Amino acid sequence: MNEDTMTITIFHNPACGTSRKVLDMIRASGEEPRIVEYLRHPPSRDELTTMLRDMQLSPRELLRTQEPAYTDLGLDDASLSDARIVELMVANPVLMNRPIVRTPRGIKLCRPADEVTPLLQPV
């Protein structure tokens, strides 16, 4: 893939079946994405805020509520601000739902995996 073709980034967790499936779908489209293992290399506060804005999601909509850290950190408290939720996700990236895929067509939380399909169409 050269710089003039589609550039795809996947925020990936190799332990997640949905994330692996989305990665396979991207590769099956003929593209080799830039893979960000976000548990090892979490986005910064600014990067996460930009991603959320671009996906048109609130921080709460990106939370993995079944993670023990969700309860341990009191994220079930509806009064927590968006800024505080983002801060906690940056510090505890396991709280971020995945996979997130960015292409020239946009950025999306690809859960279920078929959500990636429109992002893989030519621009």
Image (spheres, rainbow, N blue to C red):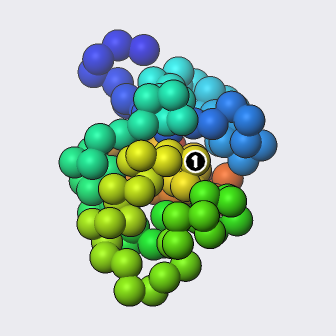
Which residue is depicted at the point 62% across and 69% down? 71
Q: Which residue is drawn at 38% across and 30% down?
A: 6
For the C terminus, the quadrant is: top left
| 121 sits left or right of 45 in the view | right
Disc 1, SS:
helix
Furthest-right residue in this view: 17
Could you tell me residue 77's position as x and y percent? 48, 82
**Front one among 90 and 107:** 90
Mark 1 is on which residue type? Answer: Val
The residue sitting at the bottom extreme is 79
Vertical arrangement, residue 30 with respect to residue 56, above or below: above
Hey, which quadrant is residue 104 in on the image? top left
Percent across and percent down for residue 91 are 42, 46
Q: In this view, does 65 lie above or below 77?
A: above
Q: Total of numbered circles in the picture? A: 1
Please tell me in which quadrant of the rendered image residue 122 appears: top left
Q: Nearer the viewer, residue 48 or 21?
A: 48
Please rate how many residues cluster around mark 1, counting C-alpha atoms within 10 Å: few if below 14, some from 14 to 19, many from 20: many
Q: Which residue is drawn at 45% across and 72% down?
A: 60
> Percent x, y for residue 36?
47, 29
Q: Position of residue 19 (x, y in %)?
A: 66, 42
Disc 1 marks which residue? Answer: 94
